[in-house]
Image (spheres, rainbow, N blue to C red):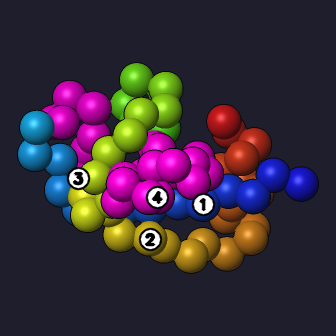
């Protein structure tokens, strides 16, 4: 089973075309990114890129919501 993790974008300075503030984004696990205070996020392009961890707030969603999001991906 794939684990899905989500964050909400709180800041997008310099990345306005790639990230929307107040929007939910899926995080891809990347241990190297963690070491550099970054997150690998699927952005508006539909691809995953590294962004500063400080731009996001982690959220815990009910499993029912995660399952529904996963179906639409």
Alpha-carbon distance for marks 4 and 3? 21 Å
- 56 relative position to 33: left or right: left
Q: Which residue is mark 3?
A: 21
The kind of secondary structure element at disc 2 is: strand
Span highlighted in magenta in the image:
15-41
Circles 2, 1 touching at the beta carbon (< 8 Å): yes
**At x 45% / y 49%, what residue is drawn?**
33
In the rendered image, which quarter contains the C terminus? Answer: top right
Give residue 19's position: percent from left, percent from top.
27, 40
The kind of secondary structure element at disc 1 is: strand
Alpha-carbon distance for marks 3 and 2? 14 Å
Q: Along the polypeptide, which appears first: circle 4 or circle 2? A: 4
- Compared with 60, 38 (above or below) is above
Alpha-carbon distance for marks 1 and 3? 18 Å
- 28 relative position to 56: left or right: right
Q: Which residue is mark 4?
A: 34
Q: Which residue is mark 1?
A: 5
Alpha-carbon distance for marks 2 and 1? 8 Å
- Check if residue 64 falls in the magenta segment: no
Give residue 32's position: percent from left, percent from top.
51, 49
- Compared with 48, 22 (above or below) is below
Residue situated in front as seen by the camera: 43 or 34: 34
Q: Residues within 10 Å of mark 4 (few under 14, many from 20)?
A: some
Q: Residues within 10 Å of mark 2 (few under 14, many from 20)?
A: some
The kind of secondary structure element at disc 4 is: helix
Alpha-carbon distance for marks 4 and 2? 14 Å
Q: Which residue is mark 2?
A: 58
In the rendered image, which quarter contains the N terminus? Answer: bottom right
């Amino acid at each position: 089973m794939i684990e899905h993790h989500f964050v909400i974008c709180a800041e997008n300075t310099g990345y306005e075309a790639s990230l929307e503030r107040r929007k939910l984004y899926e995080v891809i696990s990347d241990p190297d990114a963690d070491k550099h205070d970054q997150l690998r996020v699927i952005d508006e392009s539909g691809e995953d890129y590294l962004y500063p961890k400080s731009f996001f707030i982690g959220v815990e969603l009910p499993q029912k919501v995660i399952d529904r999001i996963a179906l639409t991906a």
